[in-house]
Amino acid sequence: MSKISGRPTLSMQHVYGMHLRVARWREGAPGTPLLFLNGIGADIAAAAPLLAQVAGREVWTLDMPGVGGSPDALLPYGAPTMAAILIEIADRFGHARIDLAGFSWGGALAQQVAVQFPARIRRLVLMATTPTVAAPGIGWAALLDDDMLASGLKLPTATPLGLAYQTMAMAGWTSAAMLPNLKNIPTLVLMGERDGVVPACHGETIAQLIDGARIEVVPGSHLFPFTHAATVAARISAFLDQPAAEQAAA
């Protein structure tokens, strides 16, 4: 696919026995590239309206196994394995350091990547996510919230096995004990003010555990990164572009 007009370049990456479809916007652009990790069952197409608007840098994302253009994994996988796969892909792209953003399930995986490979992460953006997947108050039944219904977004796009493996990858997962170790990674936490899936208190917990992390409660419900794509893309860009000295003072 063309690199212009907001359309990404697509490729298939074969890593550790998995076949993963990867999309790259502005491939080769200067500056630190941004890796975006999507919510459970969501594919590249769902993320495209947001990622096409994160300007001034290369942005890449992928379909998890059994989602979109990625076939089902042959075996279940865990969060540490997927984190290692993502860093392997970054290596292939020549990305020694990356900025990292994650939404919902992808926000949990982003935390795993950051705690597992902290030297590889320059800045971290966590959206509508939690430090403990099994924590009380997470209302998965509210996924079909008003923002999603109004937007017409069709999620998820995963196979039954793909959804099962994504769910299993985070079964019992928590980052809480390790998040204090991320104090040297500037972190922005964005939570939806009407999120019935992952209430804002989960983001507040993340911000409390990462010294210096900044939390902002923004308009919208769980799917705010997609239903308010232009506003969220601008906020992500501003955070990633902010000089380190200003972030330290914020």
Image: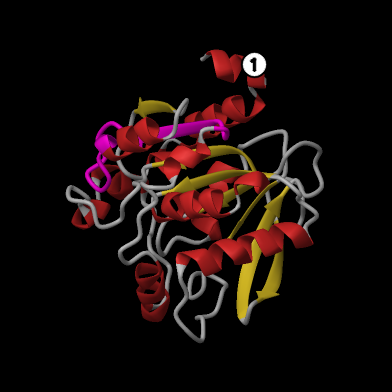
| Residue 234 quadrant | top right
Above or below, 92 against 5 in this view is: below
Above or below, 131 against 72 in this view is: above
Residue 123, position as x, y percentages in the image: 60, 36
Label 1 crowd (10 A; few <14 / some 14-19 / many >=20): few
Quick check: 206 left or right of 250? left
Taking the spot 69% from the left edge, 71% from the top edge, the residue there is 13
View extreme (bottom): residue? 74
The magenta segment is: 184-201
Taking the spot 36% from the left edge, 72% from the top edge, the residue there is 168
Using the rendered image of the protein, determine whether residue 144 is visible from the camera's viewpoint: no
Residue 26, position as x, y percentages in the image: 75, 45
Q: Give the camera-side residue of 30 and 6.
A: 30
Q: Is residue 200 magenta?
A: yes
Q: How many marks?
A: 1
Taking the spot 61% from the left edge, 37% from the top edge, the residue there is 53
Quick check: 176 left or right of 19? left
Residue 95, position as x, y percentages in the image: 76, 51
- Per the image, the residue denoted by label 1 is 245
Q: Is residue 149 magenta?
A: no
Using the rendered image of the protein, determine whether residue 147 is visible from the camera's viewpoint: yes
Q: Give the camera-side residue of 25 and 116.
A: 116
Above or below, 133 against 196 in this view is: below
Q: Amino acid at mark 1?
A: Ala
> For the N terminus, which image quadrant?
bottom right
- What element does badge 1 sit on? helix
Q: Give the camera-side residue of 90 and 132.
A: 132
Taking the spot 63% from the left edge, 68% from the top edge, the residue there is 21
Q: How is the image coloured?
A: secondary structure
Residue 206, position as x, y percentages in the image: 37, 38
Quick check: 149 left or right of 46? left
